[in-house]
């Protein structure tokens, strides 16, 4: 497939000698306007790649923070079409920052896989992470997405052994998302030394960048994980910052966007210090 924004971004960061900061937020949480304001401001705060969650009523791999964000978004009327519209609007002012849609297959199946792939590509989406589609179902969405020029990003976990890993990597592109802990998002802090070993093991099987997520909340953790990974993914901490800024009715306040950007800026500082500390 042709080079994507994700490929270009990771190649650029590799030449700089630092990992990517990959930020996650739920589309439509707490409302579309706030999501769009954050989308537009995140690159300036230090986000290198943006994952946009497609809210779903039964997010089995997500912890309480991201589950609550999805429910807030759905309550506010967020749909898959509205999520694609957000990306399309974002692309009017930013043609460089990679956008990855992350979520579950059910909303895409309801939308229609073929129609979704075409609409996502047209909107300016760069990649997909669909957590409940195994490699055995690649013909459902993975292969059509790759054919359309979208990266299909797989999750590898601590339980993905060397026997299973080749199947996981077979049609993966863009980057590999290594889930640093067993369990749901935001449930524990990752062990940097164990993560380093796992990243090295995955890299023996692929030339793709390896990004690490689940449990990273602070700049210090981001620096520790980024010392060995090609990217550091932060989701629950960002979603929690959104939640903490809302009013008693769950609506955005003047503090919402600044609170998230302050956190992302702090995390970006950690990621940018990651390789410097190793070199020192």
Image (cartoon, helix red, strand yellow):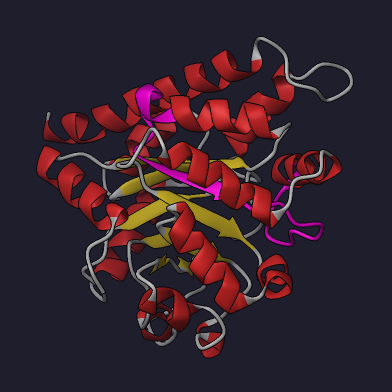
- The question of residue 55 being in magenta is answered with yes
Give the quarter of the figure containing the C terminus. top left
Return the residue found at the far top.
254
At x 69% / y 39%, what residue is drawn? 28
**Residue 230 in the image: above or below residue 201:** above
At x 64% / y 26%, what residue is drawn? 34
Quarter holding residue 174? bottom left
Quarter holding residue 6? bottom left
Nearest the viewer among 38 and 123 is: 123
Q: Which residues are magenta?
A: 42-64
- The question of residue 271 being in magenta is answered with no
Residue 36 x %, y %: 57, 32
Nearest the viewer among 122 and 202 is: 122
**Residue 209 in the image: above or below residue 248:** below
Nearest the viewer among 242 and 191 is: 242
Return the residue found at the far right.
249
Q: How many marks?
A: 0
Give the quarter of the figure containing the N terminus. bottom left
Residue 117 x %, y %: 51, 70
Residue 204 visible here: yes
Nearest the viewer among 6 and 155 is: 6
At x 66% / y 26%, what residue is drawn? 242
Residue 46 x %, y %: 36, 27
């Amino acid at each position: 497939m042709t080079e994507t924004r994700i490929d270009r971004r990771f190649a650029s960061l590799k030449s700089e000698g630092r990992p990517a900061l990959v930020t996650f937020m739920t589309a439509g949480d707490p409302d579309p306007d706030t999501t769009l304001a954050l989308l537009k401001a995140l690159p300036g705060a230090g986000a290198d790649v943006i994952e946009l969650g497609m809210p779903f009523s039964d997010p089995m791999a997500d912890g309480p923070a991201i589950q609550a964000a999805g429910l807030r978004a759905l309550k506010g009327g967020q749909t898959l079409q509205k999520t694609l519209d957000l990306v399309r609007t974002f692309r009017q002012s930013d043609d460089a920052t990679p956008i990855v849609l992350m979520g579950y297959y059910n909303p895409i199946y309801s939308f229609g896989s073929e129609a979704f792939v075409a609409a996502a590509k047209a909107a300016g989406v760069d990649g997909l992470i669909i957590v409940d589609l195994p490699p055995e179902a690649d013909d459902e969405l993975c292969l059509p997405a790759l054919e359309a020029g979208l990266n299909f990003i797989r999750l590898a976990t601590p339980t993905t052994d060397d026997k299973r890993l080749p199947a996981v990597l077979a049609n993966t592109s863009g980057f590999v998302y290594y889930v640093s802990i067993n369990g749901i998002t935001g449930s524990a802090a990752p062990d940097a030394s164990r993560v380093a070993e796992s990243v090295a093991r995955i890299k023996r099987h692929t030339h793709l960048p390896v990004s690490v997520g689940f449990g990273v909340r602070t700049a210090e953790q981001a620096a520790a994980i980024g010392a060995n990974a090609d990217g550091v993914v932060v989701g629950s901490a960002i979603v929690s910052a959104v939640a903490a800024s809302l009013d008693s009715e769950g609506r955005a306040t003047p503090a919402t966007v600044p609170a998230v950007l302050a956190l992302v800026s702090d995390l970006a500082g950690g990621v940018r210090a990651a390789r410097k500390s190793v070199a020192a």
